[in-house]
Amino acid sequence: MKINQFWIRVLGIFGIFGGLTLFAGDMLFYYDPINTNFRENMGNASDFRIITSGITSLIATWFYMLGLVQVYYALKPTKPLLRNIILICFGAVLTAYGVIHGAYIAIATSSKLATQNNLDINKAVYLATEANNILRLFIYPIFGLLSILFIIQVWKRKTLYPRWIILFFPLIPFLIQSPICKNLSGNIWTIICGGYLNLILVVFFTASTIALWNIKNIR
């Protein structure tokens, strides 16, 4: 199967759109110009914002999976077994982004009901939050395996990526999330830290698209 330079670029742009779409979904849940408490903001969000945010989880997942096709072609020189493992892990992680974001509807709805009925918001969202946290536990080991294999293959020059792409692979920004968020406040904190996990994928797919921008036809 061949793919030309135009489609390599387009596929990367789809990945970027996936991150931006789900980032918008994060802001529909979290953003309030005068409050940085995520649960309170979800409790005060309109029905339209909550429903629309849920819809972004599906659309963004489609975009992310299209973006993954670009990564597939970048991994063409890699041994088939390793390439397939990396792609399955990456696909599992990207799919989980959509599933976990969609599950946040339960947290947002619980927050909204608690706010409307003067209930303890932390108790109201406890069950939905615990379920969401358990979903994440399935992804962490997959993400760990993905990171190890991807970084090793890139470092050994077994892919079409240059080595500098490692700096933009999601593992690096994921590990520095805490110190970054500790030094932010106000609306900037809400925007960056509220949408951080999707912003790191925007960064990755942007870097991936730049790295492969001039790649010619690949078999």
Image: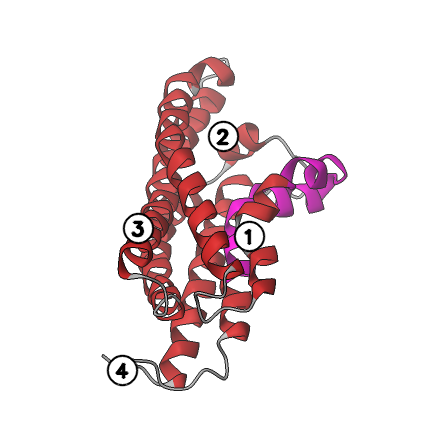
Q: Which disc is residue 85 wearing?
A: 3
> Which residue is at 41% across, 47% downward?
146
Front disc: 2 or 4? 4
Numbered disc 3: secondary structure: helix
**Which residue was labeled with disc 1?**
200
Is 153 drawn above or below residue 130 in the view shown? below
- Residue 212 percent location from the top left of the image: 48, 76
Q: Earlier in the sequence, mark 1 or mark 2?
A: 2
The CA distance from mark 1 to mark 2 is 26 Å
From mark 2 to mark 4, how far is it between C-alphas?
49 Å
Q: What number is the disc on residue 43?
A: 2
In the rendered image, residue 145, in percent from the top left (x then y), is placed at 41, 42
Is 86 situated above or below 129? below
> Magenta part mainly helix, strand or loop?
helix
Within 10 Å of disc 4 (Cα), the crowding (few <14, some 14-19, many 20+) is few
Sequence-first disc among 3 and 4:
4
The stretch drawn in magenta includes residue 80: no
Q: Mark 4 points at which residue?
A: 2
Residue range (magenta):
176-204
Nearest to viewer (mark 3 / mark 4): 3
Crowding near pointer 1: few (<14 within 10 Å), some, many (20+)? many
- Measure the alpha-carbon separation of dots 1 and 4: 29 Å
Going by the image, does 19 lie left or right of 73?
Answer: right
